[in-house]
Amino acid sequence: MALLALLAAIGVLITPRKELHFFGMIISWGVVGLFVILMQKTSWWSYHFQLLYVPIGLFAALGLDFVIYHTLQAINFRTPAVTGFIVISFVAMAFNNQYAALKQGMLSTNYTKLDSFDYARDDAANIIPMIKPEDSIFICGNPRMYVLTSHLPELSTNGWILEYYLDFQWEDFYTEFRNKPPTYLFVKNDYDRLIESKSEKLWQVILTEYREIDTVENGKWYKKLSSL
């Protein structure tokens, strides 16, 4: 985004002199988008910044137009073919990273993650034959395992973004888990240390009331002792 941000800065400088009302609306879009991003206390995910793509893109287009126009004015080529080549080169340079990412995504032949539900199928393979219809389940990790095991999550808490939990959410998680412990529990790699550091009493419940029954590539499966 560096080059687009630079072009957008040029667009911001030149637009107020020509289209003040348009400038005000696009700046407002950017301010609202930035405010929504800043509202996230912990969830600083890259896709949130897509909220700013429209204002940055519009200003970048205006900045690119300004740069191309004044470059052609300074060089003053008389041949349309050369002028067209310069324009295409500027545009290609500005959007090279975006084009490369799009090309890589469209032409990728790596279907491993798609076929394996993002590794969930392998992680759930040993549990699927064991789990019974009356058993309950909770996944601290990839939620696709709910689909693969044909079981809904036992708790209202979602277990796939524990790293973004606030303190009150950890307390709710502990209360729900204590009151309605699932038969099977999956804990993703590194989530064991996270749970222990954020809610030691929850981790103690897991250690005392559950037994590890399977270790897979991306985590561990536990089963409630009373269900063994």
Image (tube, grey):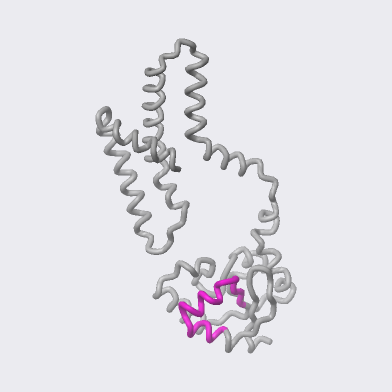
Give residue 110's position: percent from left, percent from top. 69, 49
Q: Quadrant of the C terminus?
A: bottom right
Magenta stretch prevailing secondary structure? helix
Q: Residue at x 67, y 65 (%)?
A: 148
Give residue 7's position: percent from left, percent from top. 39, 35
Q: Is residue 96 above or below residue 75?
A: below
Give residue 185's position: percent from left, percent from top. 61, 77
Q: Is residue 212 above or below residue 126?
A: below
Q: Residue at x 43, y 73 (%)?
A: 169
Q: Quadrant of the N terminus?
A: top left
Segment colored magenta: 185-206
Along the line of sight, the residue nearer the viewer: 85 or 177: 85
Left or right side of 164 for 220: right
Give residue 62's position: percent from left, percent from top. 37, 30
Q: Is residue 66 magenta?
A: no
How many numbered marks have been drawn onto this rendered protein structure?
0
Along the line of sight, the residue nearer the viewer: 213 or 76: 76
Residue ranking furthest to the top: 78
Left or right side of 57 for 82: right
**Residue 126 location, quadrant:** bottom right
Q: Is residue 84 above or below residue 184?
A: above
Q: Residue at x 36, y 49 (%)?
A: 33
Left or right side of 89 for 73: left
Left or right side of 37 for 13: left
Q: Is residue 195 magenta?
A: yes
Along the line of sight, the residue nearer the viewer: 226 or 57: 57
